[in-house]
Image (cartoon, rainbow, N blue to C red):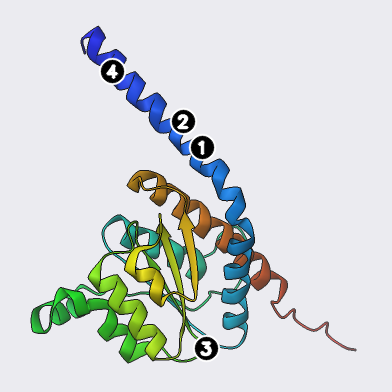
Amino acid sequence: MPDQTTDVVAGVLDQHLADHVAVAGAMRELVPLVREIGSLICERFASGGVLYTFGNGGSAADAQHFTGELIGHYKRDRRPLPAVTLTTDPTVMTCIANDYSYDDVFARQVTALARPGDVVAAFTTSGRSPNVVAGLAAARAKGATTVLFAGGDGGPAARHADHALLVPSTQTPRIQEMHTLSLHLISEMADTWAAATESTPEEPTA
């Protein structure tokens, strides 16, 4: 790679790292909200609720990552927690998209599955994806509690969010990086809670 190109790339990479550090630092202001959302999810799990997640593209990957940490485990050996990502069934997704529209792929699943006491969490960098907005609106109509992981002002999706965790950035990479941080923090809370509430076998009596 020519020296001039190397210098340009190095400058771009340095800027990415600087931007990441700046946004990560700004996330300290959102820690109370992260704790609130984590506590809410644990409370709903305790009362038999289910967490449903969804998003598009990289945000779909974040939604699936979150579910994986909960059904699997984050750090501790404990019971699986009830979480479902709506993008993981391609048959259902393509059926709805083909028979209705792509804008309906989350709303129709939420309408079928979500109930009061459940939590429906959407991941989106802009908050403007029509299918995400429709999915959150459908969740509210079903009586579920809605959580939005987005950036900037949250876009139209914020109108349908009971809790909106908005990363203070408009850059897609930075928003997605902070979504990963946020889901890890909440996974830590859920992991700790679930491990602490596991029933322990009774000691045998003579």
Q: What residue type is labelled 1?
A: Ala
Q: Which residue shows up at 67% across the image and 70% down it? A: 193
The quadrant holding residue 17 is: top left
Whole-percent x and y of residue 180?
Answer: 46, 53
User: Which residue is tagged 1?
Assistant: 22
Closer to the camera: disc 1 or disc 3? 1
Task: Tell me: residue 29, above or below residue 105.
Answer: above
Q: Which amino acid does label 3 sit on?
A: Gly
Task: Tell me: residue 36, above or below residue 185.
Answer: below
Nearest to N terminus: mark 1 or mark 4:
4
Q: What residue type is labelled 2?
A: Ala
- CA neighbours of label 2 inside 10 A, class few (<14), some (14 to 19), many (20+): few
User: Which residue is tagged 2?
Assistant: 18
Task: For the residues labelled 1 and 2, say whether their Cβ atoms are less than 8 Å apart.
Answer: yes
Whole-percent x and y of residue 202?
Answer: 79, 84
How far apart marks 3 and 4 lie (CA) works out to 52 Å
- CA neighbours of label 1 inside 10 A, class few (<14), some (14 to 19), many (20+): some
Q: What element carries label 4?
A: helix
- CA neighbours of label 4 inside 10 A, class few (<14), some (14 to 19), many (20+): few
Q: Which residue shows up at 57% across the image and 41% down it? A: 25
How far apart marks 1 and 4 lie (CA) works out to 21 Å
Task: For the residues labelled 1 and 4, say whether their Cβ atoms are less than 8 Å apart.
Answer: no
